Image (tube, rainbow, N blue to C red):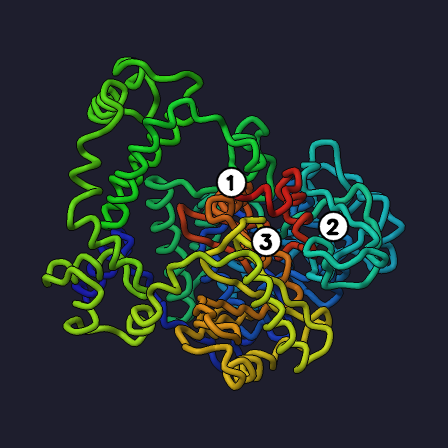
């Protein structure tokens, strides 16, 4: 018995074991939260601690609401971490939108669990319950003792379709997230005026979207809470496990706080001076004039060669140095000048000096012009073969495409890539891309009227030729796209337009993607790479931006979104994302992005049309 007790204490001290992880409902007579509906706001909670509190609500008969709605009269308690006060609470949402709801600190739930009954929340309230009959009349909320009273907004605030909270814009709030909407009922069709909502969108003035998640700072229980946990008599073994669980979790949390600080991510302003340095903040037409093109051209060859060999870090180092040299305002004339540029080290400065003196670099001949380099370049042109596979083929002694056809073990994708090698690696003229778009549009409209069919990629950015054709399809009614994928592909195959299947992806959320090979009817037509992506109308704007590119532009947009506490993907733009390192702790709230312009506005950027995104 003594040994078990000592082991329990040691485990608790080390913070490696959380007692009672298998705790379930307390059984008959313990559903003291039955009929109670709760939402636990994640602000200032660690993920583990948040999960513990949520499970206790459910274990004792309560109903948990994971995502806070815009307004409600049915939520009994909104529970906050103990450090949240009335000022912080009002930064999260408008309390008057939640009638009959008590806004309490988590100490209330701790006391309920300890006493095995639903206790009076008066001593734990941040703001007293809002009377539904007075919610539009009162100008001040009743605040618990010790908190300053705050004036309430003068108006009932509107919301958007995704349940985002919209509050009046204050002096200190960030204007870059202000909603700008226009009447599109009379506009002609264009990729940038699609709206998955009504034909006319009402303008909302002086409003900002406020996420329901705020700063997450990992914190443990304070001394007052620990006293509360230990006070009273523990009557059951079940209760003891729960209390021990919470205490052990707090000890782990304390150790975690000492070693790692939670990254705070909110919809927040980002310094304009830093934002202007992002590629997405400036048009691609404003590219800096390269005063040292003779140097960067040689180094570009090395970067490409190392990338093809999957030497990622060396390739990345060269790319960063090339970018720094490209932005150097003067022509480099010496090794010392090259060395003074950030990102250029001793060895690279030697290479720059060699190029300045002789006009070429011996290393380029060694790395980029030998048999191995040329063979690897040839092999990576086979669809489905990356740098690793190409290197493996070279190591096995293969040197030509015929070697691969006769001797190599190829996947189905590689066999198709090898069969159509020349066609797939030939750039597609812009006129032919337009023909392919028309062919797919005709087939789609024969199945369902009203579909929107658009080619994205470099074609939409205005390039004269393309590597492949990305066709994006949706329907304005929001649902007619759902059963189009397989019938459309069958139709295109039956007519002989699609000749080979590569990949079918049906696990990317609500989007469906097909990769294959197509050929237009007629003598002498080439086989071309075709991607067909079917998306819901609500995701059409972010999907259009994503599949338009360029890849560099997309990376820049996503990085800026992260810096502003958001998350951008082909599915949408989310705000109020809380991260710890690279890990997302919360999913935040989906912002309305009916057009590409709206995405730029949420990020506080000037809109860039597709031809200005060719970074």
Instruction: Looking at this view, name the residue that lies furthest to the front.
Output: 523
Kindly report which numbered mark, 3 or 1, lies closer to the viewer in this rendering: 3
| Residue 409: quarter of image | bottom left
State the image coordinates of residue 455 (x, y, percent, origin top left): 58, 61
State the image coordinates of residue 569 (x, y, percent, origin top left): 53, 55
Give how far apart the Cα atoms at labels 2 and 3 are.
34 Å
Identify the element where label 1 is drawn.
Answer: helix
The residue that label 1 is drawn on is 563
Residue 567, placed above or below residue 283:
below
Instruction: Looking at this view, name the residue that lies furthest to the right.
Output: 137
Give how far apart the Cα atoms at labels 1 and 2 are.
22 Å
Question: Is the residue marked by circle 1 packed among few (<14), some (14-19), or many (20+) residues within 10 Å?
Answer: some
Question: Is the residue marked by circle 2 packed among few (<14), some (14-19), or many (20+) residues within 10 Å?
Answer: many
The residue that label 2 is drawn on is 166
Residue 301, placed above or below residue 25:
above
443 left or right of 4?
right
- Front residue of this view, candidates 602 and 361: 361
């Amino acid at each position: 018995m003594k040994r078990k007790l000592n082991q329990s204490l040691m485990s608790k001290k080390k913070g490696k074991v959380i007692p009672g992880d298998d705790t379930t409902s307390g059984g008959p007579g313990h559903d003291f939260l039955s009929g109670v509906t709760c939402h636990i706001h994640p602000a200032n909670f660690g993920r583990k601690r948040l999960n513990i509190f949520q499970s206790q609500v459910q274990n004792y008969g309560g109903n948990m609401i994971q995502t806070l709605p815009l307004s409600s009269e049915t939520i009994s308690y909104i529970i906050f971490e103990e450090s949240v006060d009335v000022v912080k609470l009002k930064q999260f949402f408008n309390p008057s939108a939640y009638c009959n709801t008590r806004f309490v600190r988590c100490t209330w739930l701790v006391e309920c669990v300890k006493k095995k009954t639903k206790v009076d929340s008066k001593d734990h309230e941040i703001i007293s319950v809002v009377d539904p009959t007075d919610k539009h009349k009162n100008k001040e909320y009743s605040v618990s003792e010790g908190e300053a009273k705050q004036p309430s907004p003068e108006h009932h605030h509107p919301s958007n379709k995704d349940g985002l909270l919209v509050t009046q814009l204050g002096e200190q709030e960030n204007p870059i997230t202000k909603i700008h909407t226009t009447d599109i009922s009379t506009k002609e069709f264009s990729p940038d005026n699609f709206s998955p909502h009504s034909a006319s969108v009402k303008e909302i003035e002086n409003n900002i979207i406020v996420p329901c998640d705020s700063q997450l700072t990992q914190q443990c229980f304070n001394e007052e809470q620990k006293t509360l946990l230990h006070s009273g008599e523990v009557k059951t073994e079940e209760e003891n496990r729960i209390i021990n669980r919470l205490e052990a979790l707090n000890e782990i949390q304390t150790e975690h706080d000492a070693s790692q600080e939670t990254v705070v991510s909110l919809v927040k302003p980002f310094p304009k001076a830093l934002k202007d340095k992002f590629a997405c903040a400036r048009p691609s037409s404003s590219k800096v004039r390269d005063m040292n093109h003779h140097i960067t051209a040689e180094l570009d060859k090395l970067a490409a060669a190392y990338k093809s060999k999957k030497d990622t870090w060396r390739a990345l180092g060269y790319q960063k140095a090339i970018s720094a040299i490209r932005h150097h305002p003067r022509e480099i004339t010496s090794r010392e000048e090259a060395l003074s540029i950030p990102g250029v080290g001793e060895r690279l400065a030697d290479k720059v000096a060699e190029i300045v003196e002789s006009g070429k670099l011996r290393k380029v001949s060694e790395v980029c012009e030998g048999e191995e380099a040329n063979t690897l370049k040839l092999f990576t042109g086979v669809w489905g073969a990356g740098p690793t596979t190409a290197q493996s083929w070279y190591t096995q002694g293969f040197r030509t495409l015929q070697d691969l056809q006769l001797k190599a073990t190829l996947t189905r994708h590689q066999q198709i890539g090898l069969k159509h090698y020349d066609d797939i690696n030939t750039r597609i003229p812009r006129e032919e891309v337009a023909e392919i778009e028309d062919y797919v549009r005709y087939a789609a409209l024969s199945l369902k009227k009203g579909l929107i069919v658009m080619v994205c990629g470099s074609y939409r950015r205005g390039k004269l030729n393309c590597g492949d054709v990305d066709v994006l399809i949706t329907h304005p009614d929001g649902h007619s796209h759902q059963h189009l994928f397989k019938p459309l592909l069958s139709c295109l195959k039956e007519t002989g337009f699609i000749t080979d299947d590569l990949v079918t992806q049906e696990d990317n959320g609500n989007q469906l993607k097909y990769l294959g090979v197509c050929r237009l009817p007629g003598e002498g037509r080439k086989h071309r790479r075709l991607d067909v992506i079917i998306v819901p109308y609500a995701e059409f704007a972010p999907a259009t931006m994503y599949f338009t590119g360029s890849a560099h532009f997309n990376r820049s947009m996503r990085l800026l979104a992260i810096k502003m506490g958001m998350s951008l993907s082909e599915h949408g733009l989310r705000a109020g994302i809380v991260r710890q390192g690279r890990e997302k702790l919360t999913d935040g709230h989906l912002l309305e992005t009916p057009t590409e312009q709206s995405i730029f506005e949420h990020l506080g950027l000037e809109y860039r049309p597709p031809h200005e995104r060719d970074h």
